[in-house]
Every structure is written in structure tokens, then in C-alpha cells.
């Protein structure tokens, strides 16, 4: 390949933008790319051509960059960095449900700002500060850290919010959790007490253990 051809490609703004995204793992913010000389107008043009995915204003992704099983969780976490993956989406991550949520469930602080997310579909659930800050874990997806509630907190939240999750999904997830080698019944009951659902949860646990 000639040096002239390489020079032309290196001077192509679209090519440079795509290469910059690849260097950043396929996901990047407009501000980070601007520091490499990539213009926002170039990213917008690539998005309109279908060569980029716009997760939200100022956050772009290469279409083939996330083959991860939980790619949507990573997209949502990057779009809502102050949120926490919760409820059915957290159950799905931990392998505690066969339900296939049509949106990523994200907890945000009561009264907090809910950003407009373009991709993937997101459903916001508002938690009071006492419950919002409890049992947040950091899991790695696609080489990046994602905030997600612990399995025990997730089960308690699902029990707290039957109008969102459904009792059938919650009980099926609880049964699967209790049957797993990672189950920690004492920890589950501690979290249930902190979430004030211990009296509701205990009869189900005792019945399933019996």
C-alpha cells in the first residue's frame, strides 16, 4: 500500500474518528475525542450514516465494539454514570431470572436528574437515599466498571416493588438464589432487615428451605 494512500487515509476525518474510538475500546465521549482533534460534527455525520451508535448526546459507540453478553448494561451505565443497575436487569446479570427485560432498569436518587438516553432503552426507578446507597457492587463488563446492586439487595428491592417486577419473577429468582452455591441466607436476611422487608421475605425463605 503506497505512502500516499496512507497519508490520504490519515487525513480523512471520518477514518481518524473511527480509529480514535477503536483505541478507546469502541466507546468514547465527545470531549475525550475532541482532545485528539476529532470534531463533534464528524461524529454526528458518522452517526447519521449509521457508522456509529449514539448512546446519548456526547457519547458514541462503534456498532461492532460490544459483543459482550451484557453490552446493554455497559451502555446504560456509561450513559447514566450516577445510576445503579437494579431489579430485573440485575437479576438477569446474576443469572437469577429467565425474564428478558425490554429495557435496562437503573436506579437513580429520588429527586435526581434522569438523563435522556437514546440507546439502549432505559427504565429509571427512583430510590430514596437510604436505599439507593446500600449494597452497590462494581462489576467489570467489557473492561469497564459498572455499578450494580448485590444479589441480596436486588432480591429485596424486587420484593419491595412487586408492581414493577412481579411477585412470580421475584419468587422464581429467590428460589434460584437459594439453590445456588453462592447463596448466603444470613446475609440475605441482614439486607432484608435493612430494606425493611424481612417479615415479608422470611416466610418465603423458610418455605423454600423446607
Image: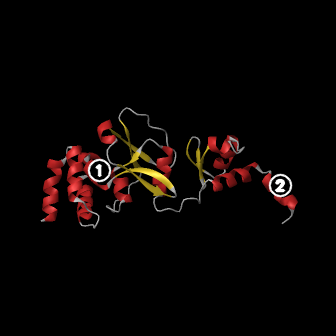
- Look at mark 1 in the image and give the residue it sits on: 153
At horizontal 13% and vertical 55% (from top left) the residue drawn is: 203
Q: Quadrant of the N terminus?
A: bottom right
> Which residue is painted at 67% across and 51% down in the image?
49
Q: Earlier in the sequence, mark 2 or mark 1?
A: 2
| Measured Cα–Cα span from mark 2 to mark 1 | 54 Å
Q: Which mark is residue 20?
A: none
Compared to 132, does 200 lie above or below? Answer: below
Q: Quadrant of residue 139?
A: bottom left
| Residue 106 percent location from the top left of the image | 40, 46
The quarter of the picture where residue 83 lies is: top left
* Colouring convention used in this rendered image of the protein: secondary structure
Disc 2 secondary structure class: helix
Vertical placement of 210 versus 125: above or below?
below
Residue at figure coordinates x 38%, y 55% from the top left: 101
Q: Which residue is mark 2?
A: 8
x and y percent of residue 55 in the render?
54, 47
Q: Are marks 2 and 1 in contact (CB under 8 Å)?
A: no
Amino acid at each position: 500500500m503506497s505512502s500516499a494512500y496512507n497519508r490520504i487515509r490519515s487525513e480523512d476525518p471520518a477514518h481518524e474518528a473511527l480509529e480514535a474510538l477503536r483505541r478507546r475500546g469502541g466507546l468514547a465521549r465527545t470531549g475525550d475525542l475532541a482532545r485528539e482533534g476529532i470534531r463533534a460534527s464528524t461524529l454526528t455525520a458518522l452517526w447519521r450514516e449509521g457508522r456509529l451508535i449514539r448512546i446519548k448526546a456526547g457519547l458514541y459507540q462503534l456498532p461492532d465494539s460490544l459483543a459482550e453478553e451484557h453490552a446493554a448494561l455497559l451502555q446504560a451505565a456509561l450513559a447514566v454514570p450516577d445510576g445503579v443497575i437494579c431489579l430485573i436487569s440485575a437479576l438477569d446479570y446474576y443469572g437469577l431470572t429467565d425474564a428478558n427485560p425490554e429495557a435496562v432498569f437503573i436506579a437513580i436518587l429520588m429527586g435526581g436528574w434522569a438523563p435522556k438516553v437514546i440507546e439502549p432503552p432505559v427504565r429509571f426507578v427512583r430510590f430514596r437515599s437510604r436505599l439507593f446507597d446500600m449494597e452497590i457492587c462494581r462489576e467489570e463488563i467489557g473492561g469497564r466498571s459498572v455499578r450494580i446492586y448485590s444479589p441480596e439487595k436486588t432480591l429485596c428491592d424486587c420484593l419491595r416493588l412487586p408492581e414493577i417486577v412481579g411477585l412470580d419473577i421475584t419468587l422464581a429468582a429467590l428460589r434460584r438464589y437459594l439453590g445456588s452455591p453462592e447463596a448466603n441466607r444470613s446475609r440475605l436476611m441482614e439486607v432484608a432487615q435493612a430494606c425493611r422487608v424481612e417479615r415479608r421475605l422470611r416466610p418465603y425463605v423458610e418455605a423454600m428451605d423446607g
